[in-house]
Image (cartoon, rainbow, N blue to C red):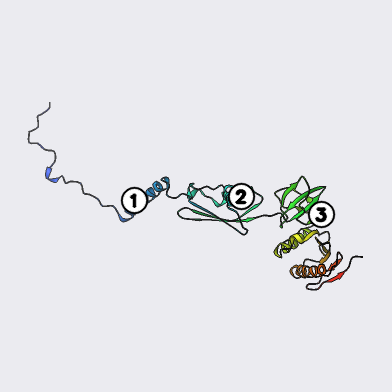
Amino acid sequence: MSQQLPQDFMPWNPEEVKPPVKRKLKPGVKAVFICLSVILVAVILLCGGLFRIRTITVVSDSMMSEAREREVIQWAGLEKGMSYFSVSEKKVRQSMEQNRYLICQDVQKFLPGTVVLYVQERFARANVHVLGVTYLMDEEGMVLERLTGSMDDNLPVVTGMQTRDVNVGKTIVAGSEEQLDAYRRIISELVSQGWLRGVSELKVSDPDSLYLMTVSGYTVHLGTTESLRAKIGTVRAVEEKLRQMGHKGGVIEASVPAVATYTPAE
């Protein structure tokens, strides 16, 4: 049988009930909240377009026109307005490797929106005949073009090179590594001395007995690739003197550095 409780009955003492105590955040927790807030603000700024590419600069070892620079930027897959953080050096290199005339040396980024491309261009330096087909190569032996018509008369012809494989966009596979090395060394020196167009033929069949044929009709024996700078420099001076003297054709022996002898044509 239930009983009615007194009206003044209280199961607890109201004086013992205390208001909840406000707890303060620990310093470490507060720091975490601050970091999260900063990250959130950064994300908002990025989404708002603060870090966007505004300047793209091309630095090359050769003179480039503005039109050529725009082409390089397009091949790099870059354009103004894209996200700064979306620019990947690896992706830029992969994009530029699709153009066999370009070498991406470096990609640098500067906040808030600048990208600098360091580029080297490949240039045709010589003709080479393989099984009746003429190809253009750069000074490293990279095959740049397969010519359907006549060869480039402004560039020397490489003869005597044994080849095992020729593919446009790849380095020619020579039967002899010594032949390819001789080609690279001589072409590089001719370019360095500004005399590439003064040579009509480069014979590399024997790397220990290399020959040049000049545009003026002189046959030059260089011997090995040792001291090429002195040898080619001497040949240039001797050829100029021979032409002034009225000599035409003949052989210039230049296998000894800084020494040259001349045998007139019969």
Q: Left of 223 or right of it: where is 101?
A: left
Report the residue at 71% width, 63% height from top. Answer: 194
Q: Measured from the top left, where is residue 26 in percent x and y?
A: 30, 54
Report the residue at 75% width, 69% height from top. Answer: 233
As helix, strand or loop, the secondary structure at mark 1 comes to helix
Q: Measured from the top left, where is residue 85 in percent x and y?
A: 48, 50
The three-letter amino acid code for the residue at tag 2 is Met
Q: Left of 234 or right of it: where is 64?
A: left
Mark identifier at residue 33: 1
Q: Left of 39 or right of it: where is 17?
A: left
Whichever of labels 3 and 1 marks the residue nearer the N terminus, that label is 1
The three-letter amino acid code for the residue at tag 3 is Gln
Please state which of residues 2 and 91 is positioned toward the viewer in this rendering: 91
Report the residue at 74% width, 68% height from top. Answer: 229
* Quadrant where the image shows the N terminus: top left
Mark identifier at residue 162: 3
As helix, strand or loop, the secondary structure at mark 2 comes to helix
Whichever of labels 2 and 1 marks the residue nearer the N terminus, that label is 1
Q: Measured from the top left, where is residue 227 in percent x and y?
A: 75, 70
Q: How crowded is mark 3: few (under 14 residues within 10 Å), some or many (20 or more)?
A: some
Q: How far apart, in angstroms, are the residues tagged by discs 2 and 3?
A: 31 Å
Residue located farthest toward the top when viewing the structure as drawn? 1
Q: Measured from the top left, where is residue 199 in percent x and y?
A: 78, 60
> In front of the other: label 3 or label 1?
3
Whichever of labels 2 and 3 marks the residue nearer the N terminus, that label is 2
* Quadrant where the image shows the C terminus: bottom right
The three-letter amino acid code for the residue at tag 1 is Phe
Q: How crowded is mark 1: few (under 14 residues within 10 Å), some or many (20 or more)?
A: few
Q: Mark 2 points at which residue?
A: 96
Q: Are marks 2 and 1 in contact (CB under 8 Å)?
A: no
As helix, strand or loop, the secondary structure at mark 3 comes to loop
